[in-house]
Amino acid sequence: MALQDAVERLQVHALASGVLVAPDNVDTTAQNSDIYALSFARNGEMGTEAAAQARDIHNLVTQIVIQGSNILAIEQRAEGMLETFVNKLRNDITLNGTVQTINGPIVYQIVRTIDQNKTTLTMEIITQVKMRGTF
């Protein structure tokens, strides 16, 4: 079980939720699309027990970003995307065997920003996962 494998699995679920671009690794291709997702590890804790007993807890973040000039069109495109993504996670609590389990509630926030003629809606979903250590 590697942390990057879990991050990549989140990207698979983002693509299946209506996102157009969700690269395995954070790169510049995402920003060229008007709907994209980036997933990454934000923080966590790694146990110091023996390798066979260690438990690591990580907070993985998925940011689904929708950009455009028309706020109504953006809201319509975003409709249902968050719930679809979360339901994918609920049906895959081990993220295809990359983690031991999703640990606790899935937390989200939605931020809307308007900069000149561009509106951006960002859904940030935080998924806490439990993993065995990979020492």
Image: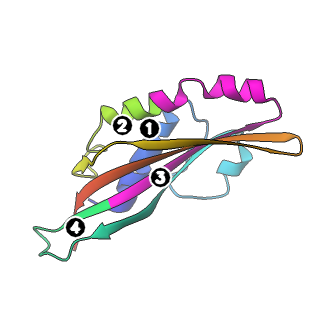
Label 4, label 1: how many angstroms apart (C-alpha)? 24 Å
The residue tagged 1 is 13
Q: CA distance from mark 3 to mark 4?
A: 20 Å
Please rate how many residues cluster around mark 3, counting C-alpha atoms within 10 Å: few if below 14, some from 14 to 19, many from 20: many
Q: Position of residue 82 (x, y in %)?
A: 51, 32
Q: Nearer the viewer, residue 43 or 16?
A: 43
Amino acid carrying mark 4 in the image: Gly
Residue at which label 3 appears:
61
**Residue at which label 4 appears:** 133
User: Quick one: 105 or 10, which is closer to the camera?
Assistant: 105
Separation (CA) of disc 3 from disc 2 = 13 Å
Based on the displayed image, in which of its 4 quarters is residue 48 positioned? bottom left
Type of amino acid at the residue the image marks with label 1:
His
Left or right: 89 with respect to 73? left
Q: Is residue 71 above or below residue 108?
A: above
In primary-sequence order, the first of circles 3 and 4 is 3
Q: Quadrant of the N terminus?
A: bottom left
Start and end of the magenta stretch? 58-83
Mark 2 and mark 1 residues within 8 Å of each other at the beta carbon = yes
Farthest-out residue, right: 116
What's the residue type where badge 2 is placed? Leu
Say whether residue 85 is magenta. Answer: no
The residue at 24%/58% (across/down) is 131
- In the rendered structure, which disc, 1 or 3, sits on the residue that comes first in sequence? 1
At label 2, counting other C-alpha atoms closer than 10 Å, the crowd grade (few under 14, some 14-19, many 20 or more) is many
Tell me residue 29's x, y (percent).
67, 52
Question: Does the segment drawn in magenta span residue 65?
Answer: yes
Mark 2 / mark 1, whichever is N-terminal: 1
Instruction: Tell me the distance, in whole angstroms, between the alpha carbons under discs 2 and 1.
Output: 7 Å
Residue 89, numbered circle: 2
Callout 1 environment at 10 Å: few (<14), some (14 to 19), or many (20+)? many
